[in-house]
Image (spheres, rainbow, N blue to C red):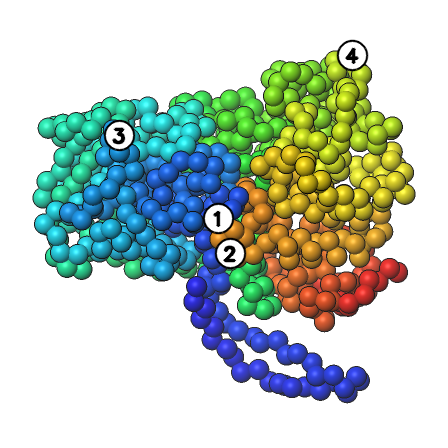
């Protein structure tokens, strides 16, 4: 990556402190492109499961290269250690464990191509490539396809993918659109391509995968008329202007001169072909590829500038790479005119807002959405409206919604804390309808919620993913959130009901083992029980990792356990390492003792030392997690990036705060990892976080001031941030235990 900084002359270089005689470091003040600090390849190796391609913040189109090979490592279509590219598809998931999307694969070819990724069946050509001939930045990706000598460049707007291919001289150059291409869980069910003229094709791809009913309508335009275009169905040539079937593709033929550029625009819609056409006309009416690249870069610069930091080059690279990933999802789902495919299978119109989807709520309710309330409140307002439209269509709030579908992946009803958090932070929403939707999601008969309401806990069962303990704890937290909203709206009966349900976490606490344990339907704890084992009663975790999930009542948890035992247990969480012969599942990564930073249930735990008045341990552990579990290398995430949650933890922690309870508007404080941060608030104010003596060694808070006055709290409220001002940290190398 290249970094361009334009330094302003700094006065006072080499200032000597009269008090202690030590030379003071003078911070460089710079005007720079923040996009230059982003490494879009971070997370494309290891368990991160990210993609490196072109996208704008919250964009409908994620135009990125696919290696063409299936597997866990290639969930996002691209795996850094690979050396093949099968084409460039227009939809991808960022950092998940779900192998879906990969719609509309485009690939440029010529006479040099000979090899196929599918030796049996349909011909799927691929090219070799080298990372030395590959580069990317926010909103842009390019690679030299070594098997053909073709240079591929990609950029996007919100709803349109823009390709630029530079060809060598060849009589048999081609561009393929393959709607039959699929990867991992994805499978085409019904596809269609129509040749409208020699520069325009249109159609759709309806597929089934993790999301059961995906619909991608498209209009595709070429800058140069093709000499000929051949349609295929199941690898057989079709001599018609339209082809329909499960596996269809089109090959457009060209004669190209050396260094000739052919550009392709592909507009998407979940609602209709005409919707895609409107999106294309509205967003890229021209053929200026470089202009679109520049516009994408400007949009990214605007979003990254929401938090401006000062620090070392390495700190800026880490911070802005993670902030970039925060803005990749949710994904825009509505057309320029508001049309979208709803979760009920019908088309709807989002009136006065952008409809979003791709809500990985079990992950993102923890820190990603609280971060959006601070730096993307307008988008948060539209996300809440998107939740409520999902409720209109299905009678429930989304659990894990994707491409106009409910996947029901993971547990909890975590749209609830997102809504409640937004309400108390003053983000406009229909509160009465929101409460109605929250109650409906918390009283449905499915997902063992009916049993939970009857027994006060979810009993263990034979299901492989019973997750009974995790469900009980997460439902109880969500219930607390509903009680708070009901109280604010004067709904006393609802408040009373859900306040009682919020205490259900106590029903699975075992005082003998001092863990939450599974119970059967008769109320008996089940045996054998080993808290470090990964069993079906804990969602992608064990009893150690889920012990701390009572974010609405940490004081109550401390009381039940006893402060001394709680402190010992918290220390042990970070020191009791798995044995060499322990079998760790794929999601148990980033281990520090039993703490697993690679998975979300652990994310708030390091901040709990603040609750027992040992904040220096929070400061020590948070800094350790940053230094050991994050980098900007391709394997820079210790676990799935998970639609922004892994990154949001880093962003929050870098500026010295984190929401232990994601719905109470309170941030737990730690020592900032960076020198200075300025949060640009939507109300026009700024909140600055500054440090004194910040360094790797000086990670302990010695003193704080808020707006120039001594500040001794270990928390900061969202309201205080919105008022603007400055939180100043004085740091040192030794813990301040006073």
Label 1, label 4: how far apart the Cα atoms are: 47 Å
| Residue drawn at the location 74% of the way across and 83% of the way down | 22
| Residue drawn at the location 66% of the way across and 42% of the way down | 596
User: What residue does disc 2 label?
Assistant: 633
SS type, badge 3: loop
Label 2, label 1: how far apart the Cα atoms are: 8 Å
Of 166 and 576, the residue lying toward us: 576
Question: Does residue 33 appear in the picture of this structure?
Answer: yes
Label 3, label 4: how far apart the Cα atoms are: 56 Å
| Residue drawn at the location 47% of the way across and 57% of the way down | 39
Quadrant (top left, top right, bottom left, bottom right) of the C terminus: bottom right
| Residue drawn at the location 28% of the way across and 24% of the way down | 246
Residue found at the far front of this picture: 581
Of 382 and 352, the residue lying toward us: 382
Residue 408, picture quadrant: top right
- Tag 1 or tag 3, which sits nearer the N-term? 1
Mark identifier at residue 62: none
Question: Does residue 376 appear in the picture of this structure?
Answer: no
Q: Which percent across, then down, holds residue 612? A: 84, 47
- Tag 4 or tag 1, which sits nearer the N-term? 1
Mark identifier at residue 522: 4
User: What residue does disc 1 label?
Assistant: 45
Of 269 and 611, the residue lying toward us: 611
User: What residue does disc 3 label?
Assistant: 120
* Front position among marks 1 and 4: 1
2 and 1 marks in contact (CB < 8 Å) = yes
1 and 4 marks in contact (CB < 8 Å) = no
As drawn, 71 above or below 22 = above
Taking the image as shown, residue 374 lies to the left or right of residue 454, namely left
């Amino acid at each position: 990556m290249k970094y361009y900084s334009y330094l302003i002359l700094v006065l006072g270089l080499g200032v000597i402190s009269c008090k202690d005689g030590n030379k003071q470091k003078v911070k460089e003040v710079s005007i720079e492109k923040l996009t230059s600090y982003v490494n879009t390849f971070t997370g494309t190796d290891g368990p991160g499961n990210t993609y490196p391609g072109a996208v704008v913040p919250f964009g409908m189109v994620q135009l990125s290269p696919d290696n063409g090979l299936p597997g866990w490592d290639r969930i996002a279509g691209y795996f850094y250690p690979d050396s093949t590219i099968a084409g460039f598809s227009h939809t991808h998931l960022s950092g998940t464990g779900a192998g879906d999307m990969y719609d509309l694969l485009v690939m440029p070819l010529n006479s040099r191509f000979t090899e196929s990724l599918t030796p049996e069946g349909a011909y799927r050509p691929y090219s070799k490539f080298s990372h030395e001939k590959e580069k990317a930045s926010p909103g842009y990706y390019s690679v030299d396809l070594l098997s053909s000598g073709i240079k591929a460049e990609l950029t996007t707007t919100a709803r349109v993918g823009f390709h630029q291919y530079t060809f060598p001289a060849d009589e048999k150059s081609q561009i393929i659109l393959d709607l039959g291409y699929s990867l991992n869980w994805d499978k085409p069910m019904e596809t269609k391509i129509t040749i409208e003229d020699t520069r325009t094709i249109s159609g759709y791809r309806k597929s089934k995968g993790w999301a059961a009913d995906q619909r991608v309508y498209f209009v595709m335009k070429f800058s140069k008329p093709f000499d000929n275009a051949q349609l295929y169905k199941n690898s057989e040539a079709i001599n018609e202007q339209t082809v329909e079937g499960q596996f269809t593709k089109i090959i457009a033929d060209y004669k190209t001169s050396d260094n000739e550029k052919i550009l392709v625009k592909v507009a998407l819609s979940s609602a209709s072909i005409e919707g895609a056409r409107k999106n294309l006309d509205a967003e890229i009416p021209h053929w200026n590829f470089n202009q679109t690249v520049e516009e994408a870069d400007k949009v990214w610069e605007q979003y990254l500038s929401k938090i401006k930091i000062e620090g070392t080059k390495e700190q800026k690279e880490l911070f802005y790479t993670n902030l970039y990933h925060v803005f990749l999802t949710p994904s825009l789902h509505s057309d320029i005119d508001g049309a979208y495919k709803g979760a009920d299978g019908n088309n709807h119109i989002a009136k006065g807002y952008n409809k979003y989807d791709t809500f990985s709520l079990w992950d993102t309710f923890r820190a990603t959405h609280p971060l959006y309330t601070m730096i993307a409140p307008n988008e948060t307002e539209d996300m809440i409206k998107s939740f409520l439209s999902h409720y209109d269509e299905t009678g429930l709030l989304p659990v894990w919604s994707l491409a106009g579908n409910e996947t029901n992946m993971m547990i909890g009803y975590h749209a609830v804390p997102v809504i409640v958090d937004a309400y108390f932070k003053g983000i406009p929403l229909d509160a009465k309808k929101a409460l109605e939707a929250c109650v409906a999601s918390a009283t449905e008969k499915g997902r063992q919620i009916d049993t939970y309401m009857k027994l006060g806990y979810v009993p263990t069962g034979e299901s492989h993913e019973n997750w009974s303990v995790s469900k009980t704890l997460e439902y109880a937290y969500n219930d607390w959130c509903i009680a708070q909203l009901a109280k604010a709206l004067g709904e006393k009966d609802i408040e009373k009901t859900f306040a009682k349900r919020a205490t259900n976490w106590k029903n699975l606490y075992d005082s003998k083992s001092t863990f939450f344990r599974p119970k059967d339907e008769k109320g008996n704890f089940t045996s054998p029980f080993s808290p470090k084992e990964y069993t079906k009663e804990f969602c992608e975790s064990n009893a150690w990792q889920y012990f701390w999930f009572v974010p609405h009542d940490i004081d109550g948890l401390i009381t039940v356990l006893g402060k001394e035992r709680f402190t010992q247990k918290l220390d042990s969480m970070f020191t009791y390492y798995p044995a060499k012969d322990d079998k760790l599942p794929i999601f148990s990564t980033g281990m520090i003792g039993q703490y697993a930073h690679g998975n979300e249930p652990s994310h708030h735990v390091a901040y709990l030392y603040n609750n027992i008045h040992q904040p220096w341990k929070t400061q020590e552990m948070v800094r350790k997690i940053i230094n050991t579990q994050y980098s900007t290398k391709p394997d820079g995430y210790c676990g799935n990036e998970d639609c922004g949650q892994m990154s949001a933890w880093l962003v929050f922690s870098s500026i010295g705060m984190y929401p232990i309870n994601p719905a109470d508007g309170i941030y737990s404080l730690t020592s900032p990892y960076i020198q200075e941060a300025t949060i640009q608030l939507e109300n026009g104010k700024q909140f600055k976080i500054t440090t004194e003596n910040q360094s790797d060694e000086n990670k302990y808070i010695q003193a704080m001031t808020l707006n120039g006055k001594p500040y001794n709290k270990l928390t900061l409220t969202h309201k205080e941030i919105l008022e603007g001002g400055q939180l100043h940290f004085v740091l040192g190398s030794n813990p301040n235990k006073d």
